[in-house]
Amino acid sequence: MTVVDWCCWQKSIAATLLTCVISFGAYSGASAQAPPDFYKNKQVRMIIGHGAGNDYDLAGRVLARYLQKHIPGQPTIVVQNMPAAASVAAANFLYAQAPQDGTVFGSFSRNVPSQARMGQANVDLDPRRFNWLAATSLPVRVCIRTSAASVSSPADLFTREFIVGGAGAGSAPSILPTVFNRVHGTRFRVVEGYRGTTDLVLAAERGEIQGLCASFGQFRVYEQLFRDGKLHFLLRAEESPIAEIPEVPSIFDYAKTSEQRQLMRFVFSSTGFGRPYVFPPGVPKEHVQTMRKAFADALSDPDLVAEANRIKMDMTYRTPDQLERLVADLYEAPPALIETVKKLVPDQR
């Protein structure tokens, strides 16, 4: 073999190796994304762990219409409500029973991660294993009263009984008044058995209860009842003022010790989860990445933003990283704090 032949042979080998490297790199990059036709002609289920008319349900249906446009292949998204046990049934289903092929995702109460951290008996999941996709809204929570209620200010709660409705141990209508009673010594009486905010507002109108506690956004559809003087805001469960109702006092104003404030901050930290959406554990990473991008694109879609503004629905985008950080924070909390908080929230039996 001549020197010239030797050089030509080396160049040929180098070119072949370079071609292999480029091909392998292209293949690896492609495997990080779902095949563009994976979702084509498929039906995807969105599980909503709340009943029809709840803000989780309404927001989920708005999101579904835009989300399918941003998923490659534009699959059909079918919304399925699964409201049992204050959405715990939906969370358990997504964790252990839902298909792990990227065709089922869903939402459940923002309280579920902290309930799992506290070992609530019926919460059979580890939130650290979910594939967190995104969340919508930055909720704030309030308690309202009817015009016929026996209380007219938070100060009255320490001397008079206030009858409110509950929707199960894992729901805000039950958690908020129970925590207020156990931390501050207020006199809420919680009547359980209601299915959600819609039922609770109807019960308040019928005079069965004197008020209820829930996310502020859930009362937007009842603005006329507030204008007519039939419903009134009593207090907010947040430290910071609510821009739309700045005059409503905070329950934190009635905290007498720093420990009381610390306990409430932990219990109410679930607001950071907004309305969370997850894939089950085990869904291939390429489908997780595809859906995360679709959420980000849909929630910045000008048409979705315009519709959300028109119907006064908070669709603030929460990233997967933010949700994973919140979960990590829950599991970094000292065990002693967790044990104390367990005594504050509604009975888990």
Image (cartoon, rainbow, N blue to C red):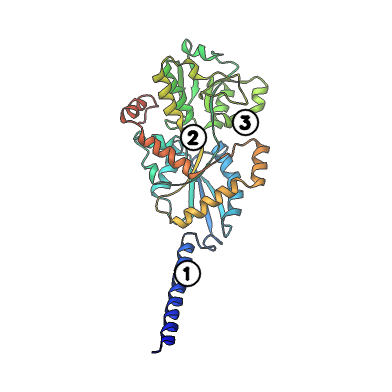
Q: Secondary structure at mark 2?
A: helix
State the image quarter where residue 54 is shown.
top right
Q: Which residue is mark 2?
A: 272
Image coords of residue 68 (percent x, y): 58, 53
Marks 1 and 2, how far apart at CA: 43 Å
Task: List the single residue furthest toward the bottom.
Answer: 1
Q: Secondary structure at mark 1?
A: helix
- Label count reads 3
Q: Which residue is mark 1?
A: 22
Do we see residue 238 in this rendering?
Answer: yes
Q: Of 175 and 24, which appears nearest the observer? A: 24
Q: Amino acid at mark 1?
A: Ile
Q: Which residue is mark 3?
A: 220
Q: Of 235 and 256, which appears nearest the observer? A: 256
Q: Is residue 235 above or below residue 131?
A: above
Image coords of residue 97 (percent x, y): 40, 50
For marks 1 and 2, the one nearer the N-term is 1
Marks 3 and 2, how far apart at CA: 20 Å
